[in-house]
Each structure stands twice: as C-alpha cells, then as structure tokens.
Image (cartoon, helix red, strand yellow):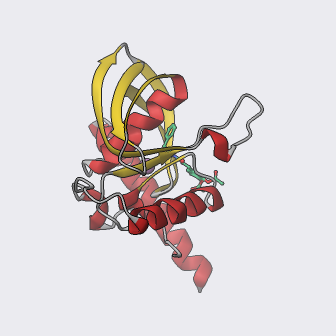
Amino acid sequence: MKLTIVEYPDKRLKEKSKVVEKFDKELHGLLDAMYQSMIESKGIGLAAIQVGHAKRVLLLNIPDDNDEQSRDSLIEMINPLITMKEGDTVYQEGCLSVPSFYEDINRFERVCVNYQDREGNTKTIEAEGLLSIAIQHEIDHLEGVLFIDKLSYSRRKKFEKEYKRAQKEKKLSKN
Ligand code: Y12
Ligand code: CO
C-alpha cells in the first residue's frame, strides 16, 4: 500500500477520526504502510488522517540520543486517550502535513495515555519530553486539529503569509 501525505489546506485534516474496532490484517497493512511513509518523509510522528484514513491510529518513533531512529522504539497507538496531563512546556513543532513551517507551541510537560496496540491489547504509557509533545501533537490530528490552529492571531497571520509566498514560489519554479 503506497500512501501519500495529505498536506494543508486539505479539508481531510479537519476531520475527526473514528474509533478502531477491528484489529485485523487491514489495520496491520495500514500501520506498516504508515511506518514506511513516515520514515521516507523523515517524520517522527504520523496520524492516519495524514495519509487520508480517518481512523484513531498514530505512530511515534522518537530518535535516540545519537539521533538514530530505530524501529525497535516505534510506538503504534490505536484509540489513544490522555488520562493525565501536568506541567507546561514549549517546543518548536513541525508537521509533515504543513511542510517547511515550524512554530513554538505550548503543551503539557507530562501525559499518561491509555491506548491499544495492533492486536487490541490495552496499554498505558507515561511520557515526558519529546515523546509527550509528539503524543499530544498526534492526538490533536485525531480531533482534526493542526499545530497551526493553536497559534495566536498574529502568528497565524504570519503563517498564512509565509504559506501564500511559498505557494507562489512553487508556481513560479514550475514555469
Ligand atoms: C515534536 C513536534 C512535533 C511532532 C510531530 C511529528 N512531526 C514530524 O514528524 C515532522 C516532520 C517533518 C519532517 C520534515 O522533513 C525533513 O526534515 C527532511 C520537514 O521538512 C519539510 O517539510 C521541508 C518538516 C517536518 C513530534 C515531536
Ligand atoms: Co502533524
């Protein structure tokens, strides 16, 4: 299954994703194809809606201290639910669906999440640091929320301006 990353301003990114009920071959195929797309695109997190599937599915693959991304540290989350959130942190986020734009976003410092794995087993994870930020970013995608939706009015305007300029440049470079 070859997947294409859906990019802003595609309306699918505003959709609320649906609960997964079947932990079958089709789900496993989607998870494997998402992993391939995420790695090929140099991402560290990806939600299913970013490849056009409105399912409550996300992947996280945080690089280690040597900046290496091992498949051993891949986390597949199905139907995640944040059960605890505490503290505040700020991180300059990026998103494969909003290429070339990065902005400081406020997040909770630590979160606890209940989720299911690809077999439907219930799991719990307590996260802080980059993993906590990535979890919150990806769970927002399941609700149809992008990190740019969290920007102040003036920063959002700055984004719109930069986005329009980038589109213009893209068009000119094609001619
Ligand atoms: C912290 C903040 C946000 C997340 C969510 C996951 N975000 C990503 O995985 C973003 C990846 C990304 C990759 C890009 O490509 C390269 O760097 C080669 C990229 O660059 C361009 O679009 C040109 C932008 C974003 C997790 C943790
Ligand atoms: Co994203």
Residue drawn at the location 36% of the way across and 23% of the way down: 112
Q: In this view, does 168 lie to the left or right of 83?
A: right
Split into 4 quadrants, where in the image is the C terminus? bottom right
Image position of 150 with respect to 57: above or below:
above
In the foreground, 124 or 50:
124
Residue drawn at the location 47% of the way across and 68% of the way down: 167
Q: Where is residue 47 in the image (x, y as percent from the top left)?
A: 41, 53
In the foreground, 88 or 56:
56
Asked if residue 156 can be seen in this view, the reply is: no
Q: Position of residue 74 (x, y in %)?
A: 57, 43
Residue drawn at the location 73% of the way across and 28% of the way down: 65
In the foreground, 145 or 45:
45
| The image quarter in which residue 30 lies | bottom left
Q: Where is residue 125 in the image (x, y as percent from the top left)?
A: 43, 27
Image position of 153 with respect to 101: above or below:
above
| The image quarter in which residue 17 lies | bottom left
Q: In this view, does 64 lie to the left or right of 97?
A: right
Q: Where is residue 6 in the image (x, y as percent from the top left)?
A: 42, 66
Asked if residue 1 can be seen in this view, the reply is: yes
